[in-house]
Amino acid sequence: MFNTISGIFNIADLRKKIVFTLGMIILFRLGAYIPVAGIDAARLATLFGKGNILGFLDLFTGGALMRFSIFALGIVPYINASIIIQLLTVVIPHLEELSKEGDAGRKQIASYTRYLTVAIAGFQALGMSFWLKGAMLDGYSFIFFLAGTIVALTAGSTLIMWFSELITENGIGNGASLLIFAGIVARIPAYVAQTVTLVRGGASIVGVIILLASFLLMIMAIVIVQEGQRRIQVQYAKRIVGRKMYGGQTTYIPLRINQGGVIPIIFASSVLLFPATIAQFIQHPLMQKMAGLISPSGLLYMPFFFFLIFFFTYFYTAITFNPTELAENIKKYGGFISGIRPGKPTATYLEYVITRLTLVGALFLAMVAIVPTIVEGVTHITSFQGLGSTALLIVVGVAMDLVRQIETHLVTRQYEGLLA
């Protein structure tokens, strides 16, 4: 294991990627401590002490929102923009054509995503400015506060978007996922400190043990499901091209239980947070009630969360897995699935299998989402309330994806895997 870790830094290309990624994460964390001008820290802390949805949103920013730093919006505007563009790609012919034009089309879609990110960030910054009017420093002009906040938060969100794209292109792992991962992990020491305070204040140690044991069991279940796959055997017939014989071999198609990985849970959380956050910024009784209903402790949060998890699990699988194209490629190279005719019957079979697997994956994600809430209700230990199923799925999923990518680099250079 130690030889493998040392081997990572002996590979120049992999070492550069890891160092670059760590550098971007450090810059991301430094930006979380640069405050926006004009805010009274004591008044801001009072707002977050009310247990509203902003405390949950702060988890995705690694504490930047609670400090009201230039990175207070985090990566959420970029994720929301990506979701909107992907949904529009399905219904708008022009975007669908661009998605099929290779690198040039993807670059154009990426540009649209960036412009939409800036627009969403500006809109959220505007709403946040009005909502935080009561937390301004005494004697500070609201006009200057409004202008400064919109510029600072929009620029900060754009900078985070740039960091995530740089990590994806030049680092290792998915940039957006890694930045969310870094923000969540940065909050864990605070949760541990809160738990120690609760225990010293008379909280049950048995309750803490039960909570930690439930987290451990969930991590094990997440790893098992994330790594689980259905292997469909494909046989290739022998064929002669010129004087050479090709084929005659057997391989398999690995279909994962959770085809979308951690992406559906990130998308579902971001979509659910966006209207709840906007509703809370609007000072109206009806909107405040709505914000309470769809907050993490609200009555409608779990039903909506379940629905969005199912939707994005199937949606992401549909846009990343094309059974018709896969069936045509198998037929093109003389392959077939035992008992299934090549062509359309193969595509129908693959679609049937992936639909059933996706159902299992979506049910797992949805069931895991309610476990922390149930355990917290039984143990009355709320110090890890922010580190719920959403955060746990993201942390474990991103960590596994990161290890998998590092192992890929190691295997190509004849090193043993990290988990060997």
Image: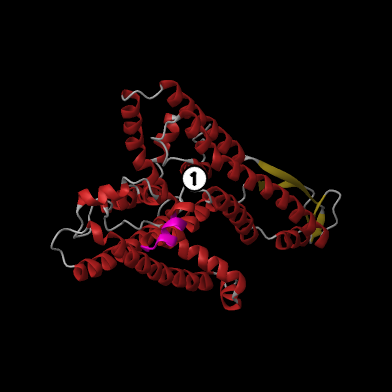
Q: In the rendered view, would you say 81 is above or below 361? A: below
Residue at the front extreme, as displayed: 285
Residue assigned mark 1:
390
Q: Residue 25: give x, y in percent of width and height.
A: 34, 49
Which contiguous range is marked in magenta? 282-291
Q: Residue 257: give x, y in percent of width and height.
A: 65, 45
User: Does the image show residue 355?
Assistant: yes
Q: Residue 48: give x, y in percent of width and height.
A: 31, 48
Which of these two is toward me, 412 or 40?
40
- Residue 366, by quadrant, is top right
Q: In the rendered view, would you say 193 is above or below 287? A: above
Which of these two is toward me, 291 or 69?
291
Residue at the left extreme, as displayed: 139
Q: In the rendered view, would you say 278 is above or below 219? A: below
User: Does the image show residue 334?
Assistant: no
Q: Residues within 10 Å of mark 1 (few under 14, many from 20)?
A: some
Callout 1: helix, strand or loop?
helix
Residue at image coords 55%, 48%: 302
- The main secondary structure of the magenta stretch is helix
69 on left or right of 56: left
- Residue 98, by quadrant, is bottom right
Q: Amino acid at mark 1?
A: Thr
58 on left or right of 266: left
Q: How is the image coloured?
A: secondary structure
- Residue 130, by quadrant, is bottom left
